[in-house]
Amino acid sequence: MKQLEIIIISLLFLVSCKTGTSKKTDTSVSSKDSINIEKTVKKEPLKKDTIKPFKMPKNCGDTTFDIFFERFGKDSIFQKKRVKYPLKWLYYEGLEDSKLIVEMTNYKSYRFFNFIEDKNAFKKEYGAFEVVKLKERDTIIYQRRGLDNGLAIDFKFKKIDDCWFLVEILDKST
């Protein structure tokens, strides 16, 4: 009885393998089809004068901090370019605020900060905060202060060669 079961299972296995390999789909393409494909794929070569590298103007186009910050807050690529590396990131270790940690962040490890919703952040049900901007000559400190939470982050921006850059983050959150 056991031998019969083994033989039947083996035959089923062999038959199923043969039918699986005997099914062939026609993947050949007629010469007429290949000509049409070549026509649709073929493109004109790019002219050298049409490819221009992106150059940042010397004055960076930042007439005001607000114009710069609007783009900085929503454009991740622009934001990453407008950080002065290594970025100094300061935060307190633990809840006692006893030990200030200084971390230097490089280009690869920098993460995007979304500032788009900051205007309406005070209306949030949870995690609401207000924004305060402090200005000193060529430096602006953009503060996020929690209303019902312990959020307290300062983003320090500095104008270097007529361009605004993020130069430091101080996280005093509890």
Image: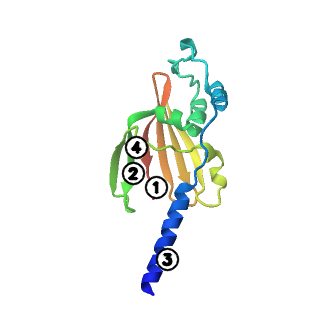
Q: Distance of mark 2 from mark 4, alpha carbons?
A: 16 Å
Label 2 crowd (10 A; few <14 / some 14-19 / many >=20): some
The answer to which of marks 2 and 1 sits earlier in the sequence is 2
Label 3 crowd (10 A; few <14 / some 14-19 / many >=20): few
Instruction: Tell me what residue is drawn at x 49 percent, y 22 percent.
Output: 162
* Secondary structure under the numbered disc 2 in the rendered image: strand
* Secondary structure under the numbered disc 4 in the rendered image: loop
Residue 56 drawn at (x, y percent): 51, 21
Q: Quadrant of residue 110?
A: top left
Callouts 2 and 4 close, C-beta under 8 Å: no
The answer to which of marks 4 and 3 sits earlier in the sequence is 3
Mark 2, mark 4: which one is toward the viewer? 4
As drawn, the label of residue 173 is 1
As drawn, the label of residue 136 is none
Mark 2, mark 3: which one is toward the viewer? 3
Residue 73 drawn at (x, y percent): 57, 39
Q: Seen from this angle, which residue lies furthest top?
A: 49
The residue wearing badge 3 is 8
The residue wearing badge 4 is 109
The residue nearer to you, when weighing 11 against 77, is 11
The colour scheme of the drawn protein is rainbow
The reply to whether residue 82 is visible in this rendering is no
Q: Quadrant of the N terminus?
A: bottom left
Q: Is residue 44 above or below residue 113?
A: above
As drawn, the label of residue 91 is 2
Amino acid type of the residue tagged 4 in the rendering: Ser
Callouts 2 and 1 close, C-beta under 8 Å: yes
The answer to which of marks 2 and 3 sits earlier in the sequence is 3
The answer to which of marks 1 and 4 sits earlier in the sequence is 4
